[in-house]
């Protein structure tokens, strides 16, 4: 569902919500956020697992190249830490490891 929510994307009770601004992002980033939320539906609330699975799926499916991961990292670098997310730098470091696997 495309809805103006307080985050870029969210998963809740079998549904995935994307903020309308996702539609303005490059294709790889759109797919990353959608796949990240799919991971929450599969694996639960863990952000690191969702980030990792989305990166790995993007690499396997061919829509997330090293260049696209660098672009995604640039957009996430300033993300603050909150109750359920590490800060952008920590998330990026983890995602880099997942991409290398």
Image (spheres, rainbow, N blue to C red):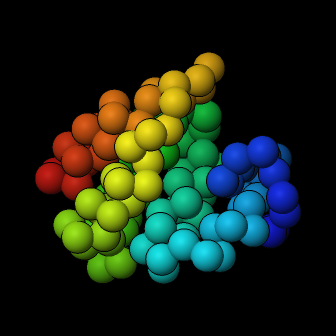
Give the x, y percent position of residue 30: 54, 71
Instruction: Classify residue 57 as left or right of residue 14.
Output: left
Q: In this picture, is 53 found above or below 59?
A: above
Q: Say if residue 75 shows up in the picture.
A: yes
Name the residue: 75% across, 68% down.
20
In this rendered view, identify the residue nearer to me: 94 or 24. Answer: 24
Name the residue: 48% across, 77% down.
26
Name the residue: 70% across, 47% down.
7
Instruction: Classify residue 26 as left or right of residue 16.
Output: left
Q: Say if residue 60 shows up in the picture.
A: no
Give the x, y percent position of residue 1: 81, 68
Name the residue: 80% across, 69% down.
2
Give the x, y percent position of residue 97: 20, 43
Give the x, y percent position of residue 8: 66, 53
Q: In this picture, is 9 found above or below 44?
A: below
In this rendered view, identify the residue nearer to me: 8 or 35. Answer: 8
* Residue found at the far top of this picture: 83
* Residue found at the far left of this picture: 100
Instruction: Classify residue 3 as left or right of residue 10.
Output: right
């Amino acid at each position: 569902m495309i809805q103006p929510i307080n985050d870029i994307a969210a998963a809740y009770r079998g549904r995935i919500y994307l903020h309308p601004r996702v539609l303005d992002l490059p294709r790889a980033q759109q797919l990353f956020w959608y796949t990240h939320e799919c991971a929450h539906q599969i694996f639960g609330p863990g952000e690191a697992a969702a980030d990792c699975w989305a990166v790995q799926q993007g690499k396997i499916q061919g829509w997330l190249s090293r260049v696209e991961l660098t672009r995604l990292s640039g957009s996430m670098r300033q993300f603050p830490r909150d109750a359920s997310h590490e800060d952008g730098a920590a998330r990026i470091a983890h995602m880099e490891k997942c991409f290398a696997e």
